[in-house]
Every structure is written in C-alpha cells, then in structure tokens.
Image (cartoon, rainbow, N blue to C red):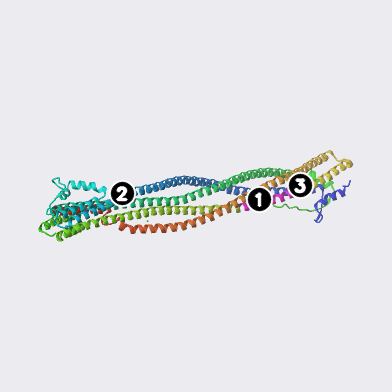
Amino acid sequence: MKLNLACIAASAGVFGATATQVEVTPVQKVVQLLGGMLEKGKKSKKEEEVAFATSSGFCADTASIKTAAITDGKENIGQLTATINKAAADVTKLGRQIAKLQADESTYAADIKAANGVRAIEKADYDTGRKDYTESIDAVGRAITTLKAKAGNTAQASALVQVTALKELYLIPDSAKSALKVFLQHSNDDGENLLVADMAAPEANGYEAASGGVVDMLTKLQGKFVEEKTTLETNEKNAKNSFSLLTQNLKAQSDNAIKIVADKQVLLARRSATKSEKSGDKNDAAKALADDEKYLKTLKADCSAQKSDFESSQKLRSEEIVALEKATRVLSSGAVAGAAEKHLPKLLLQKQATALPALRTDSNEATKRQHRVSEFLQAQADQLNSRILAAVAQHVAADPMKKVKKMIQDMLVKLTEQAGNEADHKGQCDTQLASNKATRQEKTNVVETLTAEIEGLSAKMAKLSTAIKTNTEQITALDAASAAKTAIRLAESATNKATIVDAQQAQEAVAQALVVLKEFYATSFLQTGAGPGMQGESQGVIGMIEVIESDFSRLEAETKASEGTEKKKYEEFTEDTKVDKAAKQADTEHKTEQQAKAQHDKTVAEGDLEDNQKSLDAALAFFEKLKPDCLAPPMSYEDRVARRKAEVSNLKDALKMLEADAN
C-alpha cells in the first residue's frame, strides 16, 4: 500500500519551501528533528549557563556595593549620633554659662548702684565738714586779725577789740565749737582760759601782752583746723579715687560679661543649628539605610530564586537532552531506521536550520632748730632713699624759718596732689589692664571657637564630598546594573520566546510524524499482515514519540510560566532600582546644598576669624604698650604709696619740730 502523499507533503510544508529537497523516510525526518532539538537543547543549556554567570556576577557586585553602603550608612549614623549628642551637651552647657553671666551682670549693676549710694553719703559728709572747717578757719583768721589790730592803749580800745574778736569766734559753726572749747580748756597749763583772762584785763597797758598769748593760741587753733581740713580733703580725694576705681572695675567686669554673653549666644545658636542640621542628616541617613537594606534583601531573594530556577532549568535541560539522545538512538537503530528505509516511502523534504538568540631761719637758735630738722630729714631721706626729703633737708639748712615752713607746707600739698594723681593713674591702669585682659580673653576664646568651627566645617565638607562621590558611584553602578539586568532580561525573553516557538513547532512536527507512522503501521498491518515483532517495536517508537511530544508541550508551558515570573521579577527589580536611584539622587542634592551652606558658613567664619584675630592682635599690642607704664615701673604702686606716706609723715614731724622749738 502506498502512503498518503498529500498528508506527508502537508507535514513537510512546516519546514519551509526554499531549501534543497532531499528524500527521507518519516523516521529519518524524526531523527533529524530530534537531532535539531538536541542541538538546540545543548545550546539553550549553555546559553542559560552564560546568562546565569552574568546574572550571578551582577548579584555579587550589587550585593557587595549595597553591603558597603549599609556599613557606611551605619557608621555615618553613629558619627551623626555622637555629633548630635555633643551639640546637645554644648547647648545645655552654654545655656547654664549664659544664665550665670547674666546673673553676674545683674550683681555688678546692683554693686555699682550701692557704691553710688555710699559715695553720695560720703560726699555729703565731706561737703558739710569742709564747709565747717572753711568757715572756722575764716572766723579764727578774722579774730586773729582783729586782736592784732591795736586802735590805742586804752582800756576802752582793748575791750572793743576783744568784743569784736569774740563776735568773729561766735561765727564758728556748731560742729567746730566743741573742738574750740576743748582746745581753749587745754591751752593754758595753769588751767586759766587765756581768752577770758584777756577779756577781763582792765589795764590798757596789759592788753598787748595778754592779746599776744591769745593770738598765738588762735594761730595754733587755726593751724589745727587747716591740718584737719587738709586731712579731710585728702581722705575725700582717696575716697573719690577708690570709688572711681571700684566703679570702673565693676563697669569693666559688667561690660566683659555682656560681651561674653553675646559671644556665647552666637555660639549657642551655631551649636543649636548644628544639632538641628545633624538631626536632619541622621533622619536622611536612616531612611537611605533602610532603603539599602530593603534593596539588598530583595536582591538576595531574587538572586536566590534565580539560582533555584537556573538549577531546575538546567536539570530539565539535562533530562531533555538525555531523552532526546535516547530517542535518537532508538529511532536510529536498525530496527526502526532500517525498517523504515526498507518499507517506508521516501519523502521530498527541505533542509531547515534554526538558531536561538542570547547581558594679647634766721637766728642762731632758729638756725640750730633748722639744722636739727635738716639732719632729721636727711637721715630719713637716706633711709627711704627719698630725693624729696633730701631736697627739703637742703632747703631747711639754708633757707629762713618762714620760708622753710611754707616750703614744707607746700611740699605736703604737692605730695598729697601727687598721691591723688598716682591713684588716678593707678585706677586708669587697673581699668585699662582689666578691660584689655577681658578683651584678650574674649577674643582668644572667639578665635579658638572660630578656628574649631572652620576645621569642623572643612571636615564636614570633605565628608559630604566623599558621600556625594559615593552616591554618584552607586548611582552609576545602579545604572550599569539596570542596563545589565535589562540586557539579561531581553536575552531571557528572546530565548523564552524562541523556545516556545521551537516547542510549538516541534510539537506540530512530532504530531505529524505520529500521524504518518500511525497511519502507516495501521494500514500496513491490515493489508500485509506483517509479523507481530515489528508491530511491537513500532508501538515502542510511537510511545516514545508521544512522550517527546508531551515533553515539548511541558517545555512550552514551563517556559511561558518562567517568562511571566522572570518578567514580574524584572519589573520589581526595575522599580526598586528607580526608587533607590531617586533616593540617592535626592540625598546627593541635599548633601550638595549642605556642602554649599558649609562653604558659605566657612567663608563667613573665616571673615569673622580674620576680624577677631586683628582685634586680638591689637589688644596684645596695646597690652605691650601698657606694660612699661602700668606693670613694670622702677617701684610698684604700693611701694610708692608707702614711701610717700613716710615722706608726708616725716615732713609733718619736721614741721612740728620747727613749731615746737619756736614755742
């Protein structure tokens, strides 16, 4: 019986129409198909191995990059946490320091107010005392002048003069009358009141002698008042200098506290800003870390699934190859191929090839007195090494008595003025030194703070630069990974599509071959009554071909399912990569803005540092100018005050010696 040639021809049409035509039996054609399928299976297995190697490299590289990013992220969060804690501690410490300085400032203001109150009381007492002494000295002076004026040697004139003198004495203020009373009570060794005795003298000739004693007494009284007035004025000047020095020091301390508060408030604001800024950076870093950890977790899961799929696919490919090789051996055996060669007609078929695609004085007595005084003063001058006492000693030895007294009194006044001037100078020096010290300390603190801030900003900029570079590298790596993944996906997709087409075509061809064989053996056995052995072998071949057909069907279904799964994973990978890349780009933009702000803050801080360094240099230069005049004189202020006090005491003693010897 002849085969249905139309059916065979239809089955041959599946393989194309332009290749060279050859004559083959249906079994030979199936063997050719099995051979082509075997080659495609081996090629697909190799391509899957290459694709998996590329995918594994991508997984390893990306996992390494993400692991490094996670480690850097955790380290960055640790450093940011330490910086935030340090800034918070600085803010608390600066707050306490500012509160204490403001309390000190209030205390200085209260002390200045109290000092002004005490000074007002002292000034009022001084004005009253000085007025009383001035009026007393004037009244005693007028009384002396009245007693010395002799209108005539008559009792009447004497009485008149005494009455006039008494009137002058009555003008002495109440506060000085007690002193006058005490002085008069002790002015006569016999207990007789000279003024009363003088007023009771009835003889005019006795007036002159009596009045002379009263005049001497009043002259001594006047001298006492003058001395006490001088002492009062000296005490007032010293009190005034002390008040000035106290208020200047308090003012300097108050101003210094105000300046330091201002500087610390600026530093407080900066540290608060740092705390806020670093807190923001920490939040960003925490978010980036979470994204990186999520990405790495997803990547590992996908890569693990990919590996599992690869292993399953490789196993299937291997089994497929084994089955195809076995089927080929069976069909190529003599029992099948030989029989087909003998009994089946030749078919005119076309050769076909398939390809699969692949990611800072006068008398001798007076002369002797002067010599004693001169020797006294010279001895004191030698002891104190005082040029003033030595000069006065020379004048005492050479000048008349009156001139000597006046000179000593003038010298006392001069020394008192010098003491006042030196006290003023000392006060100015102390004030300038205190103010200069405060300025130097303040500027030194500011310079140190700004220097530290600049160093911190430089370090921050360097760190931001490194972070930006790392982000850029990671974005580049993500782009490369995405491109590689896309190439792999395209290749996988193309391979899957080709595999599906091949499986479909193979199914059709095998189905057609089955039809041919089944029809042939059915017809042949009916017409010729071939032996049972051949029929048994043909049934084994047909059964194997049917298994091959079901394997191709299973390959098509699994490849379609694999394509859907791989496509979904690719889409998820692509979306995660876009999110990660967007986060890295946003972080890069934020860090670039922080870098620009840090550069601006650094430029401002460098300008402030330059200005404060100039102020510090000026303060140090001024301190060097103050040193020769305020810190390194030939003799300290305290030693000069002590020597001047001894000179004044010696001059007063010399004056008392001259007055005592005269009496």
The answer for how far apart the CA atoms under marks 3 and 2 are is: 125 Å
Q: Secondary structure at mark 3?
A: helix
Q: Secondary structure at mark 2?
A: helix
**Dot 1 amino acid type:** Lys
Magenta stretch bounds: 477-498
Instruction: Categorize mark 3 by other alpha carbons within 10 Å: few (<14), some (14-19), many (20+).
Output: many
Foreground residue among 233 and 572: 233
Badge 1 vs badge 3, beta-carbon distance below 8 Å: no
Image quadrant assignment for residue 405: bottom left
Residue ID at (24%, 53%): 139
Task: Give residue 375's position: percent from left, percent from top.
Answer: 14, 56
Q: Pick whichever of labels 3 and 2 is earlier in the sequence.
A: 2
Task: Give residue 478's position: percent from left, percent from top.
Answer: 62, 51
**Dot 3 amino acid type:** Ala
Q: Main secondary structure of the magenta part?
A: helix
Q: Secondary structure at mark 1?
A: helix
Q: Nearer the viewer, mark 1 or mark 3?
A: 1
Image quadrant assignment for residue 617: bottom left
Magenta stretch: includes residue 492 = yes
Q: Is residue 53 left or right of residue 606?
A: right
The answer for how far apart the CA atoms under marks 2 and 1 are is: 101 Å
Disc marking residue 485: 1
Magenta stretch: includes residue 514 = no
Q: Which residue is mark 2?
A: 125
Q: Which residue is mark 3?
A: 503
Task: Give residue 567's position: percent from left, percent from top.
Answer: 70, 47
